[in-house]
Every structure is written in structure tokens, then in C-alpha cells.
Image (cartoon, rainbow, N blue to C red):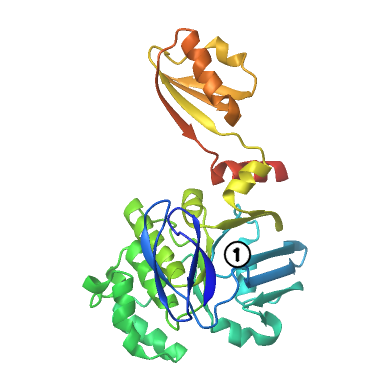
Amino acid sequence: MISKKIICPSCKTQMTVQGNPGEKIYITCPNCQKKGYFILKDHEKESNSVSVEINNLTKIYKDLKAVDNVSFNVLNGEIFGFLGPNGAGKTTTIKAMLGLIHVSSGTIKINGFDMKKDSIEIKKKIGYLPEKVSFYDNLTPVQTLNFFCELKGVDKSIVPKLIKEVGLEDAKNRKAGTFSKGMVQLLGIAQVMIGNPSIYILDEPTVGLDARWVRYVREKIKMLNEHGATVIFSSHILSEVEALCNRVAIINKGKLIAEDTVSNLNKYLHIKPRIEISINGLNGKVPKVIEKIGGVEAASAKGDTLFVTCDSDVRSHIIAVLEESGFKVINIKTIEPSLEDAFVKLIEGDN
């Protein structure tokens, strides 16, 4: 019998499952009650094993150091967010991980293989979805995936299953040139699943999509991870990264400036939560009593809502002071620090 630590893709709660190799374990998350299953593989590794290992990666283009001594690890079976502003070095790093460019110095290991020595073996295990994915307009999804199966030397019998998994069954005989951007992204996800790669690198997979397609693509990313794959996910939509990723790395000006969970980044940066307090008759004015309370970092008001950024341990004191001063508190909502808060603070601090 073996044990495996897993993370709920919905709420990120960590659980431990036990069973025999090859056994399908049915799970109900104790926190969000989401149901699913996990298959313990014969080659199951320890929960802290590394899928991607980047050490001292540097890439120089003439006078430009696009990536400067970057090091980070991606753990087996996690969804890892890779973030940074435009021109930060994300794309260069991703190209290096795919073996598409020669690096100036440093090493890249994927599933234990060295990119310089074993690039062909590594590429067999990676599914890559670029930011701008496109297919032949005159081919249907079936024809498109058959084509990529031929390129990869994979049996075409998997194509109907792939089309079903990404939800394109009703459009399987339509030509890709008639597809919306969201449908093209789903076809791209089906394409990268060919060959059952153990690692997926998805570059801005939800950019330009409306809310419906964003949600659908998000569910497919979760599906890939639930099937046991490691996912590296780059995006400018920070709410999506926060909803999907176990950990994030942030790069700026070619240098890695952070690597951790979102909650740990917020703690490290001392980003305080914000409370929204609904008060009858506030009329956009901040009560003067708020400004005298220790631990309050900032306060503002809009209409009958008061916004206060403060230490967690003074929230109840704030409510008590307001009520003692004659204010009628109708509702209270706490907004915990977000990935966007951490991202902005890190980038501004680095600049």
C-alpha cells in the first residue's frame, strides 16, 4: 500500500489517499464536498518530487539579458502559475523549457532528464498550448486531431475521446475556420492531450475569451490536473491563476522575485485584509472614530459602504467602536488579500 498527498482542484484543501498501485480511489473533499477520484500509479513518486527543475537559467540577446539567473521548481502533480508583466522574461523562460532556444547558461531538467542531453525525450512528455493557437481553417476537429496523431505517432482511435473530453462533439464535423476563439482554445487543449503528456505548459490559455469560455477552459485545465498531470499556467488574468494554482512564481525584468503559495506571499508582504461595512446614512463619509483606531492602515467610503484595510485582530474592535458611536452596521464582509495585491506590491517594489 502507498500513500499520496493530493490537493483539491476547487478549494486547494490538501488530503492524503492510500491504496494499492493502479487502484482508483474515490474522494470527497472534506472542505468543499467536491467529489472525484484519483488513480495511484505504479510509478507513483513522493508528493514532494520535482517535475521541472530550473537552475540559474540565463538568456542573453546581444545587450539584453532577457532572463537573469532564474531558478525555480515545479512539483509533480501541481498547477503552477508563472506570472510577470509584459517583457518580464516569461516567454523566453517557457521557450527554454520547451527546448526552442539555446540558453546562455544554467540547466533545465524535466522529469529528471537534462534538456541539453535529452531534449527529444523531454519533448515527448510535454503538451504545449501557445498564447496564439491556430489550426488549418479547412479541417474539422477530427481531421485536425488525426493530423497531429500522425505527427506524434499516436493511434487515431483516441480522437473521439479527446473531442468528447473538451466538449466539441457537436462541432466535430464543422471546419475550424468557423470556430469562435473559445472553441479554438478547446481544440488546442485536445491537441496537447495527444500522447498523454505528463506536463502541460499553457501560455495565456484564457486571453481574449468571454466569461463563459474562460470558465469552460478553466474546467478543462482542472481536468488535466485531476488526471495526474503537472500544469504550468501563464496568464495575465490573476483571478484565474489564483483560482487554479497551488503555487506561483513571479518574474520581473528577467529576475525571479517571488515563488510561493498565494497566502504565503500575502503574509510575507504583510498585505492586510480589507473589510467592507454597510452602514445606514454613511453618505460617503469616513467616520472620524476610525482614524483613531490602531492597526487601521487605510479607510475610504462610497455611498453607505465603508472600506477599511486593517490588521485581522482589530476587525471586531472596529465594529464595536462604530456601534458605540451610534452607527448602525447592516452588513460586514471580509475580503482577504488577493494574488493581484501581492503581484502589484512585488512589481512596484521591484521597480
Residue 112: quarter of image: bottom right
Residue most extreme to the front: 1
The percent position of residue 249, horizontal first and vertical second, equals: 63, 57
Please name the residue shown 54% across and 19% down the image: 318
- Image position of 169 with respect to 113: above or below: above
Which residue is rendered at x = 49% and y = 72% of the image? Answer: 229
How many numbered circles are shown?
1
- Residue at the image position 43 percent from the left and 13 percent from the top: 282
Disc 1 target residue: 91
Quarter of the figure that contains the C terminus? top right
Inspect the image, locate mark 1, and give the three-letter code of the amino acid beneath it.
Answer: Thr
Q: Percent x, y for residue 192?
A: 44, 76
**One can see residue 286 in this view:** no
Does 157 sit left or right of 236 as displayed? left
Question: Does the rendering let one see residue 44?
Answer: yes
Image-quadrant location for residue 348:
top right
Q: Which image quadrant is residue 347 in?
A: top right
Query: Vertical placement of 129 versus 182: above or below?
Result: below
In front of the other: 204 or 288: 288
164 vs 201, left or right, is left
Q: Residues within 10 Å of mark 1 (few under 14, many from 20)?
A: some
* Residue 9: x %, y % from top left: 45, 59
* Placement of 298 over or under 20, stated as above or below: above
Q: Say which of 57 and 177 sits in front.
A: 57
Coordinates of residue 225 in the picture (x, y in percent): 46, 68
| Closer-to-camera residue (295/236) | 295
- Point 60% across, 64% down: residue: 91
**Relative horizontal placement of residue 232, taking residue 349 as reference (left or right):** left
**Element type where label 1 sits in the image:** helix
